[in-house]
Image: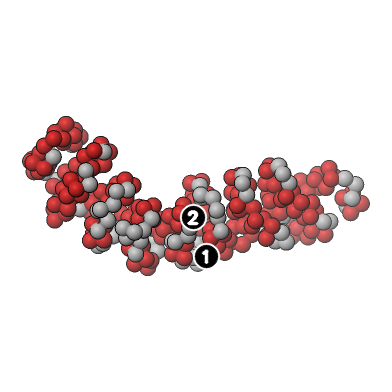
Amino acid sequence: MKSIIKKSKEHNQTIIEILFKIKQTLNDLPTLRLEYLYKELSLSQVSAKKLNDKNWAIQIEGIKELVGMDDQTYISEIELLVNNPHHLVRIEAFFAMLKLKGTEGLTLLEILEYPISDWQQMQIIKILKERVNVKLPDFSQWFYLANISVACFAIRLTAIFNQTHLINKIVGLLSINEHPLRIQAAIEVLIYLKIPTFTDQIKALSTTNNKEVQLSILYFFEEFGTLKDIIFLRDFLYDNYLWTDDELFLLGLRVIKKVFNDDSRFFNFAGLYFSNQQAMILQVMEESK
């Protein structure tokens, strides 16, 4: 085998592919022997050289070979690729680290420079759900990362994995001075976990002019609003000129109507305070028929 390996790169690659395919069909003990052979014949070095190739497809090939043969030797080199300019290389490298390091690989979230994609988020959630006997990390350690997409993902993970012990830290994000996307994510957690007890903190955000936060506030009251919140909702729509945005204003009217739970009371209330928006009021009335 060693003499064949030395002949050419083509032979090297052929043997790597053969070992890789055989490994996929064997049980644990022969697999360990294949992994040993892969390293003993210096084939891991062949795969590692691909990590620095200019062709992104070759880089991915190298990552897959090293991970497939469970080679931890070049883990630091793979880690560097999580911020590769090519998004497919970044994704492959990130999940390679999770495979090689388990949930400890999630610490890479701290160094990600690019936005984390929806697909990556779904795959991470899937991996965490599959590892039922593994202790989950404290997601709050990533709430304030500069990479806002990763920070918001960490915030939402508290809801997905029911980490209710972090609720006070979630509520701490409900500050008018906080990044709007963090606020939005925090409100989503409260809604998802059905926690209505922080109404005052939500109301304190009402001076925001950020549309996503405004929508989140309305979604919160759509879920938890009561009759005692009607005046707040009226002022929120009125003082923020939300009637100038059809999406916001229609949602606001729907929330008020749901809170009233009475068509005539809603119609009289909305007609009194938003008389210049009769068309939208009637539209909301029609939706319930």
Q: Circle 2 is placed at which residue position?
A: 147
Q: CA distance from mark 1 to mark 2?
A: 26 Å
- The circle drawn on residue 150 is none
User: SS at mark 2?
Assistant: loop
- The image shows residue 275 at horizontal and vertical percentages of 11, 37
**Residue at horizontal 13 percent and vertical 40 percent from the top:** 274
- The image shows residue 23 at horizontal and vertical percentages of 72, 52
Q: Circle 1 is placed at which residue position?
A: 134
Mark before the other along the chain sequence, 1 or 2: 1
**Residue at horizontal 24 percent and vertical 38 percent from the top:** 244
> Badge 2: how crowded within 10 Å, few (<14), some, or many (20+)?
some
Q: Amino acid at mark 1?
A: Val
Compare residues 240 and 17 and report the one nearer the observer: 240
- The image shows residue 108 at horizontal and vertical percentages of 57, 59
For the image, the number of numbered tags is 2
- The image shows residue 248 at horizontal and vertical percentages of 26, 41
Q: Is residue 68 left or right of residue 90?
A: right
> Where's the C terminus, which quadrant?
top left
**Residue at horizontal 21 percent and vertical 43 percent from the top:** 241
> Badge 1: how crowded within 10 Å, few (<14), some, or many (20+)?
few
